[in-house]
Image (tube, grey):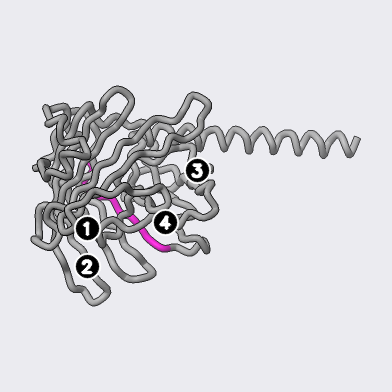
Amino acid sequence: MKNLFLKSIVASLLLVSASFAQTANEIAKKVHDLPSGKTSSYTVSLTLIDKNGKTRNRELVSYFMKEGTTEKTVIVFKTPRDVAGISYLTYDYPDKPDGSTIDSDSWIYLPAMKKVRRVSGSSKDDDFQGTDFTYDDLGTRSLSKDNFALLGSEKVNGVDCWILEAKAKDTKAKVSRRVTWVDKKTFVVQKGEYYDKQNRLQKTLTCESIKQIKGYWATQKMTMTNVQSNHKTIYEIKDQKFDEPVNASFFTVSSLERELVK
């Protein structure tokens, strides 16, 4: 009788655990699949602040286009002069029907070298051009790269949120896990924490000025702070447009090489 009782308890715990994991996966998918339109474009004002409070300002433009199931994004630095013309192109693909990952294709163009180079998968966790955002942050991370769990719920600035953990399956990943606070109603991320290989808190993300534009949820200001180096990047979006024509030729490697993206 005692063994039967214990087995019943264990079975119940396993069912609860499985349900909890499934819920985490469902939330992660809803965050991943938030509508972003067929096209979009915007200008970004970047402010980099070092540990001494010294600031550097940069401006870039970003274009997005969905072609079939492939999501294409191109980013070009406009100012200042030392980074002007640096451009980044990425193609994000959906996972295969069996759930396996199709790695994104990414290229970066450096005007000083007059050369395009491919960004390898192992470099996706590197900082993007001196900012506190990584190459991976700029694209759409595949769900199959992480194991998800719900850590609970909490309010962020009055918004009721799920606390969602994503642990990288790749044990060599520079970012071992990500914890995000997800709005229970809209599934928009409100803030985040990023942990290094030793599971030490490395960066924090705060999101502000979240609003709807043409029915799409858009975050207009993000601040990524590296708590280990005391460096931060403020990412402010301006003139964001959805479902308006963008130049399809921008999303090619040859356009990067010829510096045609404006």
Tag 4 residue: 194
- Asked whether disc 4 touches disc 1, contact meaning CB atoms under 8 Å apart, the reply is no
Q: Residue at x 22, y 58 (%)?
A: 234
Magenta stretch: residue 74 in it? no
- Three-letter amino acid code at disc 2? Ile
Tag 3 residue: 146
Q: Residue at x 20, y 35 (%)?
A: 251
- Three-letter amino acid code at disc 1? Ile
How many angstroms separate mark 4 from mark 1 (CA)?
16 Å
Q: Residue furthest bottom?
A: 52
Badge 2 density bin: few <14, some 14–19, many ≥20, Cα 10 Å: some
Q: Regarding mark 2 in the picture, which secondary structure is present there?
A: strand
How many angstroms separate mark 1 from mark 2 (CA)?
8 Å
Report x, y in % for residue 118: 31, 47
Tag 1 residue: 234
Residue 83 figure quarter: bottom left
Tag 2 residue: 49
